[in-house]
Amino acid sequence: MSSSLLWAVDVYGKVYSLSTARGRWERDTDTLLELKRVTAGQKRSWGIGCDHHIYLNIDHAEVPIRYREETYENQRWNPVDGFTDVLLPTDRWAWSDLTGMTPQPLHSFLLPSDSWEWEGDWYVDQGCAGGDPTETGGWEYAVDFPANFSREKKWNSCVRRRRWIRDRRYKARGSWTKIPLDHPKRPPIPLCDISCGGWEMSEQPGLSMVATSLQVWFRSGILPEVPEGQCWEQVEAPKEVAQISAGPGDLLWAILWDGQLLVRKGICLDSPTGSSWVLVDPPPVKGGGAIHVAVGVSVVWVVTKDYKVWFRRGVNSHNPCGSGWISIGGEMMMVDVGLNDQVGEEPFLTATPGPDSTHTLKSSIPTSDSFISSLVADREPLKPLTPTHRPFTAPGLSQGEDSEASPAPMCIVDLEAAQSPQGECASMGKAGGMGTPSSVATYPLGLESSMGVVEEEGPVWAWISGGGCDVDHIDQISWLSPSGMTHLQSRRQSEKLFFFMRWWRDWKPYRWVDVGVALEQSTNFNSSRDAIFFIYYTQYDEKKYLQVFMSEVTALVPVVRENTHHAFAVYTGERTKKRWPLVLAAQTDKDMTDWLSLLTGCCCEARGIRGRISRQALWSVTTKGDVMVHEPSPCLESLTQTLPCDMMFWLQVPGHLRCVESNSLGVVWGIGCDGTAWVYSGSGHTAGEVLPQGDMGSVHTQTDVRAVYIYENQRWNPMTGYTDKLLPTDRFPWSDDIGFTECTKSNTHPPSPLWFWVTEWAVDFGLPGGTDKEGWQYAADFPVMFRGNKSLKDFVRRRRWVRKCKIALTAPWQEVRPITLSDITVLPCLAQSNMEQVPVWALSDKGDVLCRLGVTPENPAGSSWLHVGTDQPFKSISIGGGHQVWAIAWDGAVFYRGSVSASNPAGECWYHIPSPPRQSLRQLSVGRTSVYAVDENSNLWYRQGLTPSYPQGSAWELISNNVTKVSVGPLDQVWVIADKVPGCPMELSVPGAICHRLGVGPMQPKGQSWDYGIGCWISVARKNSLRRPNFRKKPREDPGSEG
């Protein structure tokens, strides 16, 4: 979800904004700015200042705004002087606009306001009528004014012109700037209300306001290149108007001073000011009259003088007046409608509590000059405080138990008692929670100070505007939930840990920076725990800090990169989209492990993750061998709303593997780097968590052995033959595979302190391409394809040295002996499947095909291996729905196993399947009705024409490139590990980004696009499912909604 802002003004005129991405109030940087009203639109907001001027704020994330001024220089030819600016009396001006009717000399162009700046001086436009550059100074010629001009000068060309242009840029994005009021007609001041809307009708939003004389004015000419508008137009009103509200579409409602309601009709693109007013009766309340109205695309909300909230039924573009009123529970001073109404969802409302709410506040705050103060000036004394406060819910939705049981702090100001000499800001009443996505309640947030300290007393609001705030009901916004309020506003217990680390600064110049880090853990009133991770740094002698809420973290993974030791990356949803994770480096590997364990525990506590891992979990392995798990939600692969990959929270499980496979019955198999097969024993606890006594039996000692390689490089010279004296442009004599990093036998260490050497360095003779008897490979130069045979043109050589290291862990993995494996596959099935045995196929390290017998959810390790005969060794195998078994041989040939069933688990024979043209496949995955494969060039292929009667398919189709591994689920969900993803900076380029195929369905089995997630993975297993298949019976229906 993209970031948007909720604006608010307190009773002192201070302006605050609340971002949906950050979740905390921030005061505007202009401390001298004081506003009375604020209205928010799409990417821009308007306000009325206490100096009675209009202010404009444009989102800093908007595209830079530029406007091009132009004027034409006109000349006429005479026999004496040639072309000159002395024109005939009937001619146009010497400097004019395109029509020639308006004089426009260069010195007459001025900046509209201080918010603009010139980007350069005037210059001649060298593009003429045809758009081609000319060598004649940009002149265009014609017989006379006005005529058709051309770039060619003819014998009868008596006049000429050329265009001068100058660009100006709007420089005040992200700040409040004053716009002129007195051009061409100045509306009466002071102004008392303002509202913007109409941006859904066109790119020209309108701005309506109400002056003290109770007139309605409209700001016209608001364009993307003219954000301030051009002029004011008065809109006649039948009576005195006190407040006005414009929706994103063509709705405009106003409140008269006597509490009646006006609706403007006839608003359209051709007539943005409308045609006429219609009087609408207010809600039927005692002492009648409305004090506030808020308008959306097709909704209207009203607050009456008794602070009751009402919803207008039947409002739309064809019937802007609606048909009747519906009473809504709750007492509010004002409401405001946000952007969610535009997509047909229940509107998001923000509300300021009324004076009858629990624990009314009395404070020595000066009275605001708003019209609300005038409306309540003659109000009766306040009623006695009521013990409860009902949450206010959108119509048609019931209030759940959570919405009534979730307490949250609330600050309330009594405007009638604002003149009292003293008071305290001490109200902590109860308000309704977010029981459903459309439940409505307001929770003022504490403000973060410059060092991240939360103030106990928040501001007292006088006005709010959520017209530009876009909140998706699918997403959980922390500052709209009671728990999100509590950890910002009030804390019961707080613990803060402070340490020093190194941080990779993600802006130029990119480099490591010494920083201080702090983890502040807090316990809320409802006993839930949350934490904030702070990074303190100094920039240009100014102390600054970054903060990350642990509830927003999606993954904590070690970083494998050159010249990076003991580093890990902290991912959030926003940082994953930008491909900029927060990268930190500890002093030692133990410190990094401790920090990962601590932060992972905080993330689990913040998200409420406890207990065992579910059978439907998504398993994956990182490039370092760490096992990661994502606990799925129903929206992960839903038909209507797919959970983005960058929002998935990944949890580390103890263990070390090279690959992993799983299904929805809880059967999880893995293979270590040394080929040892492991089966998940079902403990289900995260890394660093203390296991309960009852789970100790499922924990075993897991070991793994991996090889560490370094390369010895030499160059030939005529005097000494091959030597380690290389050229200055060559790689190091001892290096890694690519030669950029020096790796000698003495300075090469195991991957981490958990690993220890078990062998000495030895020459590796198993390189691709072969070696000579001493292990050398030869090539013409670095880097070129190496081979084992030496020729006369080979001037460089290399050989690989190998040393093995071992790791021993206590993890919930049980070893399956005695055969070492190279690949494993588990039958994908639905969670509701009922089968006696779960088919598990594997390949030994020698390429033999094996079938595991006796595998059940209660005994996932099975009982024995059954050998399946082949003509040649295999390197990849996969089993899909309907017991479809596909495999790839060492030479890249594809085979299909026929007659495999529950009663005949080994099948009968192999059928050869043609490979893609001129391609050799290396890995494949089979789903329910689809087969995907990856070739040696990292291309992803899809097998067409698979049917129950012809399961071998008909042809291969190329889907994508840069794919290293693919996994297909039981509902044909496609997950891949991508080698490269768009938008990833080179400084953080790591292999292995997990990606999800979007749009996969029965009518679109290949999908439509990719959703990119976090990098640094080598394996993903999606052989499980969250739901039953929901295939459509009518093929003519739109398949675009299939997830």
Image (tube, grey):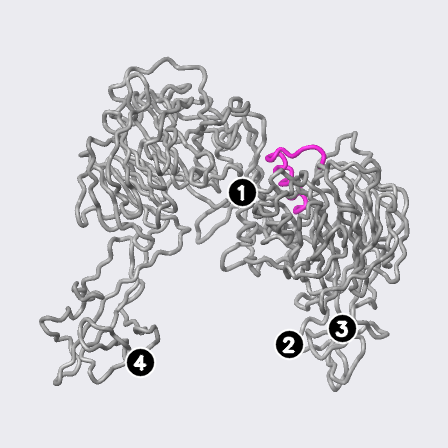
Mark sitting earlier along the chain (4/2): 4
Circle 1 residue = 548
Residue 588 x %, y %: 67, 50
Q: In terms of depth relative to the viewer, which is nearer, 179 or 582?
A: 179
Contact (Cβ within 8 Å) of mark 4 with mark 1? no
Circle 4 residue = 135
Q: Is residue 505 above or below residue 688?
A: below
Mark number, residue 831 = none
Mark sitting earlier along the chain (3/2): 2
**Quadrant housing the C terminus:** top right
Circle 3 residue = 798
Circle 2 residue = 728
* Residue 677 shown left or right of residue 612 in the figure: right
Q: Quadrant of residue 943?
A: bottom right
Magenta stretch: give its range.
591-613
Mark sitting earlier along the chain (4/1): 4
